[in-house]
Image: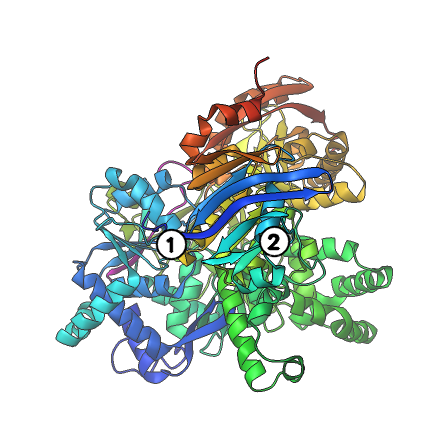
Amino acid sequence: MARKIGEVILDLRHISLSFGGVKALTDISFDVREHEIRAIIGPNGAGKSSMLNVINGVYRPQQGEIIFQGEHRKDMDTHAAAAAGIARTFQNIALFKGMTVLDNLMTGRNLKMRCNFLQHALWWGPAQREELEHRRKVEEIIDFLEIEHIRKTPVGRLPYGLQKRVELGRALAAEPKMLLLDEPMAGMNVEEKQDMCRFILDVNDQFGTTIVLIEHDMGVVMDISDRVVVLDYGRKIADGTPDEVKNDPEVIAAYLGTQH
Amino acid sequence: MTVAGAGEQPVKLDTFPRLLLAHARERGERPAIREKDLGIWQSWTWAEAAREVRAIACGLAELGFKRGDRLGIIGDNRPRLYWSMCAAQMLGGIPVPMYQDAVAQEMVFVLQDAGIHIAVVEDQEQVDKLIEVKDQCPELQHIIYDDPRGLRHYTQTFLHGLDEVVAAGRIHDQNQPDFIEQEVALGRAEDTAIMLYTSGTTGKPKGVCQTHGALIAAARGGCAFDGLNETDEVLSYLPMAWVGDNLFSYAQALVAGFTVNCPESGDTVMTDMREIGPTMYFAPPRVFENMLTQVMIRMEDAGALKRRMFHYFMEVARRCGADILDGKPVPFADRLRYALGEVLVYGPLRNVLGMSRIRVAYTAGAAIGPDLFRFYRSIGINLKQFYGQTETCAYVCLQPDRQIKFDSVGPPAPGVEVKIADNGEILVRGPMLLKEYYKRPDATAEAIDAEGYFKTGDAGFIDEDGHLKIIDRAKDVGRLKNGAMFAPNYIENKLKFFPYIKEAVAFGHDREMVCAFINIDMGAVGNWAERRGIPYAGYTDLAGKPEVYQLIQECVEKVNAELAHDAMVAATQVHRFLILHKELDPDDDELTRTRKVRRGFIAEKYAVLIDALYGGKASQYIETEVKFEDGRKGKVAAELVIRDVKTFPAVQGRAA
C-alpha cells in the first residue's frame, strides 16, 4: 500500500458522556491519524454509536476535550463538524426514500452550494454553472460506486445493500476529510460485504479520506482497519493494531465472557 | 450492388482499416461511436476514431506487435476495445476477443491456443484474471488496460495503461508518419481479420479464422438487404467475442458507416437504449423474452383501467398488428382500432422499451417462441429472424420484409447457397465462409466438404416457399426405443416458451419415454409466488414448492397437448419431470457462454437424477458443488420431487 498515514487529525481526550444517571462513556481517550482506517468495536451497548455522535457533535460530552485539526473544543457542533469536513452514515439508513439516488447524492452537496435560494429557483447564470459542477462531482461518485443503473430510481425501491451504498455516496458527495461509518455492513450478505469493503478501501486509497468505522463483523474489522479501539460498558479496554487487539485478554473476555 | 457510398472509391475498400480511413475522409464529422461516461453521452467522429486507432496501432507496434500476431481483447463493449481491434488489423494482426465473464482458467485455453503475446483488457477485474494465469501462458508478455481504476498500486512491468500506449504511439507516428499507410497498404482481403472461438458445446473451443473479405461480404450483403446506411444507430451490448456483435457493431458499422453506441454498463442497457433510440437492434430471444416478462409484470401491478386498456389493445394487435406490418389486407374497423391503440398503447410501449426508432430488429441463436415473436411484430416492431454461425459470419438466411414466417429463418441471404444433405444436415457455401480453424487442419477438412460446402451441424429442411426451417442440432436428434424421432431442442423450446420456465433439458434417446429437467425463471415465478402470498427463501426453496410444481406441471401438460397434435413428435411427450435445485450456469460448465445447454455434460453430472426419473422414484436427494463468480465454491443440496405428467393420445389428421 502506497497510502501514507499522517499526523493525528482528531484527538479525543478523557471524554465522558452520561444521560442522566446512565454513564454511556467513561474517560475515553484515543486519536485518529490522517488517512487511516480506524475501527471502533465492542459488544452491544458498549458506547460505539455514542462515540461517533460525540465526534460529529450530536451528543455533547460532560467532560473531556476534542482536538480536531489542531483546534481545541469542549464539544463539537454538528454544523461545525460538517463544515470542517466530517461526514457520516447511519446505522439505520438516513436517506430521502421518495427521492432518486441522484437527488439524494445532490443533497450531500448541500454545504458546497454557494448560490442563494432565488438564484437556484431561477436556475440562471452562476447557479446553473454551479449545479452542473455539482452534478459532475455526483456523477463521479456514481461511477465510483458503480450505481449507474439506479441513478434515477427512488431510494425506497432499492434493496437494502444498495441503499447502504447510496448512503455512503451521499456522505462522499460532501467530499469529506473524515468519514464516520456506523455499521456500514450490518445486515449484508457476504457478497455485499465484500463489495462494501472494497469501496471503503478504495475511498480511503483514492481520496485519502480518513475513516472511522463501527463494525460487528470481526473478519471485516481485522482485514481493513489500521488500528482498532475496543469499548466495553463505556470504557476503553484496548487500543492498537488488529493483531494486538485480537490477542488482548481483556478483549477476549469482553467478547467471550470470563471464566468463573 | 453498391452500398452506402462505398461503390465509387478508387481504392478497393476490402479491409477494415481501409474502410475506417475512407469513412474518416468522407464522413469525418459524423459520429462513429458513442459511450456514456459520467452520465453524459460522449461521441467520437469517424475522423477522431481513425486518429485514435492510428495511435493505438503505433503504440502496439512500439510494444513489438507484428503482422500476423494475435491480440487478445477482453472486456465489455468499450470504444477503445473496438479501436484496439481495428488497430491490430491495421498492423496486419488478428484480434482475438474473449468472453469477458469467463473465469481465468477458461481463458487459459484461448490464450495458449492463439499464442497471445499482448492483450488489451478493460479493467482491473480482467487484469487480475490474466495475472492469475500468466504463469500458465508463458507467451503472454504485455497486458494493456483501458480503465486504470484500482490499478495504481500494481507494479508489474508487463502492465501498461492504454493511455501510455497511445502516447507512445503518437510519438512513433510523428517519427514515422508513413508507417501506418504502409502497413494498411500491405493488408489483403484474404488476410485473417479476426479469430472467434466457438462456444464449444462439445469438446475444446476452436478458433474460427474469418478474413476481411468474408466479414465484409457478409456485412455488405446484410446492409444492402435491409437498407442500413450511415444514419443508422446501433447499441452494442452483446459480448465482443460473439460473432453477431462483430458483424453488427463492427463489420456493418464499418461498411455502412453508422454509429455504434456503447452502454454505460451491463446493468444500464435498458435505460441507455431508451436514451439512444437505436434504429437497428439485435438481441437473442432470451432478451426479448425478458423484456416482455418485465412489461407483463409491470402491467400486473398497474391500475385496473390501464390493465384493461392494455389487454384490450393487445388483443387488437394480436388480431391484426402483424398483418398491418406485413401490408396484408385488414378490415377497416380493425385498422381504426389499431390506430387508436398505436396512440394509447403501442407507441408508448415501444418508447418504454427504447424501440421507438427501430427500423429493423433481429433475433437469432435459438428458437423464438411464436407468441413472443408475434407480440413484437404486432406492436409495430419489424422483428426478423436470421440464421448463421460463427463459421459463416452469422450470415446464411435472413427474413425479407413482408415475408415473415414464425417458424422459418427465411430464404438464403444474397450470395449464399444452401443445400440439404441426405441426412437432413444443412450445408452452406458462399463468400462468408471461414478460412480455417486455427491450427486445426483436421477440423477444417472435416467441416468443409470437397465442393466447398460448410457442414453446419444443424438439421433442417427447405419449405415450399424456399425458406429454411431448422429442427435441431443434427447430432442431438435421436430416437426413442420404439423408433420415434426425438428432437430434444424442439421439446425444450416449447417448454421455454412459457415465461415460468427458464431452461429445460429433455432426455429420451435410447429410452422408452421422454423425461425433463426444468429450471424455473426466478423473476416470473418469484413474482407469481409473491402475488399468491407464497413465502420462499431463494431459488432452491422456491423450486421445491408444491405450488410451483403444480404450475410447471400445467405448463408441461400444455406442451404435451401441443406435441400430440403433430404426428412427427406425438410420441415424444414428456412423461416425468423434476425441477432442478440450482440454476444451470456457465460457471459450472452446464451452459456454454452463449447459454446453450451442454446436454452430455448435464446428463453425466446429474446421472443420479436421470436414473431416478427413469427408475420410477418419487423423489431423489442430490448435492451439487457450485462455483461462484469469484472462483469460490459452495454446495447446494435438496431432495427433489419427481412428478408424473398427463400425456395425450396422438391427434390424427394434421400430420405433415
* Residue placed furthest toward the top: A260
Identify whether B459 is placed above or below B275.
Answer: above
> Disc 2 is attached to a residue of which chain?
B
**What residue is shown with label 1?**
B123
Q: Nearer the viewer, residue B620 or B139?
A: B139
Mark linked to residue B407: 2
Image x and y of residue B141, in percent:
21, 49
Three-letter residue code for mark 2? Asp
Residue lying at 34% horizontally and 51% vertically, measured from the top left: A4
Whole-number angstrom distance, CA of label 2 to CA of label 1 = 42 Å
Image x and y of residue B360, in percent:
56, 69
- Secondary structure type for disc 2: loop
Q: Is residue B569 magenta?
A: no
Residue B482 in sight: yes
Image x and y of residue B132, in percent:
32, 40
Q: Quadrant of residue A244?
A: top left
> Disc 1 is attached to a residue of which chain?
B
Identify whether B212 is placed above or below B456.
Answer: below
Three-letter residue code for mark 1? Asp
In the rendered structure, the answer to whether residue B256 lies left or right of residue B444 reads right
Give the magenta range.
B190-204
